[in-house]
Amino acid sequence: MVTSGRQLNPREREILHLIVRAYIENGEPVGSRTLSRLRHLSLSPASIRNVMADLADEGYLAQPHASAGRIPTDKAFRDFAGSVKGKPLPSADRDRIFNQMHSAESLEERVAIASRVLTEMTRNVGIAAALPNTSQELDHLELIALSDLRVLMIVATRDHLVRNRVVTLDRQLTQDELTTIRNYINTNFAGWTLEKARAELLRRIEEERAMYDAMLQQITVLCQKGLLVVDQVPQVEMDGASWLIGLDLHLTRERMRELFRALEEKTRVVALLDRFLETPRGDSSLSQVGIHVGLEDAHPAMRELTLIGVTVDLPSGMRARIAVLGPMRMHYERVISAVQQIGRTFETL
């Protein structure tokens, strides 16, 4: 096979993309006679065969059997993907996405809904992630006394994230004492970043150490247990991995198991999104859809998979990543449109 790497001329690209579209639709090798029946393509089967032979020499087409037609290679899918644009979804689909995500009461719920809707609309693996920033602002704090010297600390931030932590103290704090602490922190530090609020609390405690202040003493105990410290763990949801089972990915059973193990680890999914959908903060745009055909650099078992996604900067300062993982033979326009619409909905909620 000769692969000169030259640019395709308009006729070659038109025929190549027709082959890709036909293969996406039926999964069968495409022959010259099939293309010659298309009314807008005024070429004889012989002329089409010559173009297809050139495309094969360039590495865009493969011939699975001597008497069969041609199938597109990953190089062909990359060329095709670079020309595809999303189209507006039907109004019923747009309304469905908006209504389902609008019904969610937290960002975590929206992330879960987004991944599920992506899977339902595309019949591929839907992935949604919300990546916390390092400057989350305190909305309010709740402290609830539990049995056995335990306290439930609930931190709600202005990016609509809520995190709970149960801690065990050395001595019991009454609910009245916890309510006083809660009111003090909410009154003095609402709107502060968690990092700055905690630093200021610790400064005040140190400054007043020489004085006996019962409340500051109690806050000290809670700070030692991680008050206003939240784990910066991404919220990641993925649906539809079972769709991969029915695909002919040319994987051994062991490689398929490796693929599923990789997708079960949220850190690896986030790394996949970071690697292929990273954009400088402030430069993300719904028009900048990332399409990556062939993901073997991320994992050998992903060689025949494609990732389509967007990164959205949310008003809260967080980032959302919306993506679909599926075979090269997917309906690109539909996937792009679904990804863009869900990303757009994230921006408006």
Image (cartoon, helix red, strand yellow):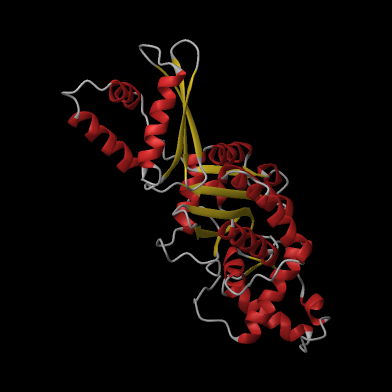
Quadrant in the picture for the N terminus: bottom right
Q: Nearer the viewer, residue 242 or 343?
A: 343
Q: Nearer the viewer, residue 28 or 187?
A: 187
Image height check: is 89 above or below 163?
below
Image height check: is 93 above or below 120?
below
Q: Nearer the viewer, residue 306 or 280?
A: 280
One can see residue 98 in this view = yes
Image height check: is 19 above or below 186?
below
- Residue at 58% of width from left, 40% of height from top? 255
- Residue at 41% of width from left, 48% of height from top? 133
**Left or right of residue 151, residue 11 in this image:** right
When asked about the image quadrant of residue 66, the answer is bottom right
**Left or right of residue 86, residue 30 in this image:** right
Image height check: is 192 above or below 212?
below
- Across and down, in percent, residue 333 comes to 68, 67
One can see residue 66 in this view = no
- Across and down, in percent, residue 341 comes to 64, 62
- Across and down, in percent, residue 238 comes to 61, 44
- Across and down, in percent, residue 196 comes to 30, 43
When asked about the image quadrant of residue 279, the answer is bottom left
